[in-house]
Image: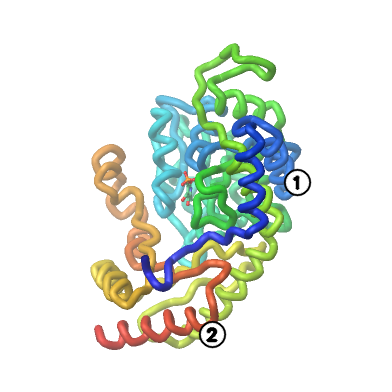
């Protein structure tokens, strides 16, 4: 394991004891911890309800299925995201249409949405990438004008807000992810929030084999996307500490800004956001150098015990997507320019000032030695 990992979960002794209690209780699934976690999430996200599921990917699958998106439909989303966002569209038999991104925020460029819409478009999946909130007004306006459903992929952005509203709560539905590198973790896990209780009830049913509210009768084709009680117990503890986590991450991001200010060959991420609060999920630099240099840099830093992340390759350039969903050459100029040059530095709640100084020093040394 790297001496300074890219990410690291923050689990308290109290949370460990809480999970142990669940294990001793004999109730390991569909019990009070699930209900407690969902209630806490709903409150945190200013929504009337939430459905906790087995991953962020499962949450995306359920939202698309509950919105009845399928073959023949098109869904607009950025290519500069984690591949899970786009895979969910393809699994439904629908077609992803890639929208370009803004150079500064690296989030969806709303000015490019008009190019992407057709009479087959059914929905937009907006991604609050790297914990940076998208300015939602133009997206909402676009979706209203074209009668499109709006899904917020907030897997990387729990705790971020856009114009005072929690991301995930603004569109028709929003999803979060709780993998161990995320802002809170349940090991594996995810959740859906919405202001529409009927929609949430449908998602809950679909997450549990299509069962009815009070029994095992399947009304529709569902999955097993349930989240187990120990994970929910951990989630309750983690969510209670989210504000503390966000503060620590934000402090660490500000420290990187100071340490890296003026480093030649890189651009630093935006320090803050005029329309909302950033949840510092990752600290992502953009290298001036072309993409091959990035992979070398990652390898050289790994040799020094420092783990960097290649967030993200553009989805439309991955082999599977090149073959299945080729895009017109030159239609995503900013995505193609930026993806491949971005690099994530270690960031987690317990990272020390000393560790961050080591990362900055080694980065400067490696970059200088490569000319
Ligand atoms: C933007 C985005 N969407 C979706 C997911 C999928 O979440 P999970 O890994 O919990 O399935 C992730 C997780 O890394 C993500 O970063």
Query: In the figure, 346 relative to 198: above or below?
Result: below
Residue 335 appears in view: yes
Return the x and y of residue 141 as percentages of the image width and height.
63, 45
Q: Do the residues labelled 2 and 1 touch (CB within 8 Å)?
A: no
Dot 2 falls on a residue whose secondary structure is helix
What label sits on residue 258 in the rendered view?
A: 2
Q: Is the residue marked by circle 2 packed among few (<14), some (14-19), or many (20+) residues within 10 Å?
A: few
What label sits on residue 369 in the rendered view?
A: none
Q: Is the residue marked by circle 1 packed among few (<14), some (14-19), or many (20+) residues within 10 Å?
A: few
Query: In the figure, 341 relative to 56: above or below?
Result: below
Q: How many marks?
A: 2
Residue 307 quadrant:
bottom left
Return the x and y of residue 99 as percentages of the image width and height.
44, 49
Residue 311 quadrant:
bottom left
Residue located at (37% from left, 83% from top): 362
Residue located at (67% from left, 56% from top): 14
What label sits on residue 43 in the rendered view?
A: 1
Residue located at (42% from left, 68% from top): 5
Query: In the figure, 271 relative to 106: above or below?
Result: below
Residue at mark 1: C-beta within 8 A of ligand 1: no
Q: Which of 289 and 142 is in front in this view?
A: 289
Residue 144 appears in view: no
Q: How far apart are marks 2 and 1 (CA)?
A: 35 Å
- Nearer the observer, disc 2 or disc 1? 1
Return the x and y of residue 333 as percentages of the image width and height.
35, 59
Sooner in the amino-acid sequence: mark 2 or mark 1 = 1
Q: Which of 323 and 61 is in front in this view?
A: 61
């Amino acid at each position: 394991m790297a001496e300074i990992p890219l990410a690291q979960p923050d689990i308290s002794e109290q949370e460990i004891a809480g999970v142990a209690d669940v294990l001793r209780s004999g109730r390991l699934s569909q019990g009070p911890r699930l209900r407690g976690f969902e209630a806490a999430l709903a409150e945190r996200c200013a929504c009337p309800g939430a459905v906790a599921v087995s991953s962020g990917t499962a949450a995306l699958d359920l939202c698309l299925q509950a919105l009845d998106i399928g073959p023949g439909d098109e869904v607009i989303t950025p290519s500069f995201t984690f591949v899970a966002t786009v895979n969910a569209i393809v699994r439904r038999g629908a077609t992803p249409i890639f929208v370009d991104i803004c150079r500064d925020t690296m989030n969806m460029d709303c000015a490019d949405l008009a190019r992407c819409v057709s009479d087959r478009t059914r929905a937009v999946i907006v991604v609050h990438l790297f914990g940076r909130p998208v300015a939602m007004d133009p997206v909402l306006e676009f979706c209203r004008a074209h009668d499109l459903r709006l899904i917020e992929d907030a897997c990387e952005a729990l705790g971020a807000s856009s114009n005072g509203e929690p991301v995930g709560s603004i569109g028709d539905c929003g999803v979060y992810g709780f993998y161990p590198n995320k802002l809170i973790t349940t090991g594996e896990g995810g959740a859906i929030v919405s202001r529409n209780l009927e929609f949430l009830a449908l998602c809950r049913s679909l997450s549990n084999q299509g069962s009815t509210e009070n029994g095992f009768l399947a009304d529709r084709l569902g999955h097993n996307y349930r989240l187990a009680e120990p994970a929910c117990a951990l989630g309750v503890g983690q969510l209670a500490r989210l504000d503390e986590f966000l503060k620590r991450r934000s402090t660490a991001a500000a420290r990187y800004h100071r340490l890296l200010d003026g480093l030649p060959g890189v651009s630093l991420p935006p320090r803050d956001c005029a329309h909302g609060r950033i949840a510092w999920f990752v600290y992502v630099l953009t290298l001036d150098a072309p993409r091959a240099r990035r992979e070398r840099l990652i390898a050289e830093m790994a040799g020094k015990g420092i783990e960097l992340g290649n967030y993200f390759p553009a989805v439309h350039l991955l082999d599977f997507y090149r073959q299945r969903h080729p895009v017109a050459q030159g239609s995503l100029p900013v995505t193609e320019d930026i993806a491949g040059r971005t690099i994530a530095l270690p960031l987690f709640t317990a990272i020390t000032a000393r560790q961050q100084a080591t990362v900055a020093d080694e980065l400067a040394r490696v970059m200088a030695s490569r000319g």
